Amino acid sequence: MTLKVMPFSLTVCKLSSYDSINTGSDFYFTAKTDEEISLVCKTEDTPQNCTDREDGWRAFRIEGVLDFSLIGILSEISGVLAKNKIGIFAVSTYNTDYILVKEKSFDNALAALKQSGYTVV
């Protein structure tokens, strides 16, 4: 399986409203529940109306379009990282999954995944 490194730093934050999200950006994820509005975005695009934020994330993407019948892909990756004491923040889209790790752990995460047989581009 091939993983692609996303070439930018990310921020995970909570917002008070959708008003200031840079929807023109080429990379962001939002989620809304009855309790919160969450945003993952490039750090440079982080809105001012954050109620909480955590900077210092990096991401890689599972390449290709994943069929919904595939089982355990995210579990396997998170297992490799957990064995190496690396926490994750995962985001799934219709096509694929993105795995975020803290910048300080990013190189170790990629090394552990390569050692486990993943191709990293």
Image: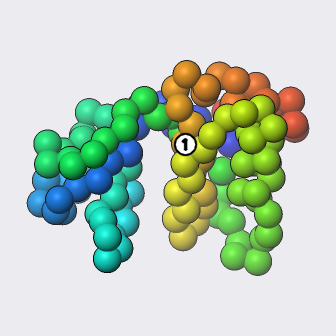
Q: How many marks?
A: 1
Q: Tell whether 108 sits left or right of 33.
A: right
Query: x, y (%) of residue 90?
Result: 56, 53
Label 1, secondary structure: give it.
Answer: strand
Residue at 13% across, 53% down:
20
The relative height of residue 66 versus residue 118 in the rendered view (above or below) is below
Q: Tell whether 19 sits left or right of 87.
A: left
Check the picture and name the quadrant holding the C terminus.
top right
Residue at 14% across, 48% down:
49
Query: x, y (%) of residue 35?
Result: 31, 70
According to the picture, the residue beneath numbered tag 1 turns out to be 100
What colour scheme does the image use? rainbow
The relative height of residue 39 versus residue 45 in the rendered view (above or below) is below
The quadrant holding residue 75 is bottom right
- Depth check, front residue: 60 or 24: 60
Query: x, y (%) of residue 78?
Result: 72, 48
Q: Is residue 102 something that shows in the picture?
A: yes
- Depth check, front residue: 92 or 66: 92
Q: Tell whether 117 sits left or right of 97.
A: right
Question: What residue type is disc 1 on?
Answer: Leu
- Circle 1 residues within 10 Å: few <14, some 14–19, many ≥20: many
Residue at 12% across, 60% down:
19
The relative height of residue 93 versus residue 62 in the rendered view (above or below) is below
Q: Is residue 60 something that shows in the picture?
A: no
Query: x, y (%) of residue 88?
Result: 60, 44
Residue at 38% across, 45% down:
12
- Depth check, front residue: 64 or 15: 15
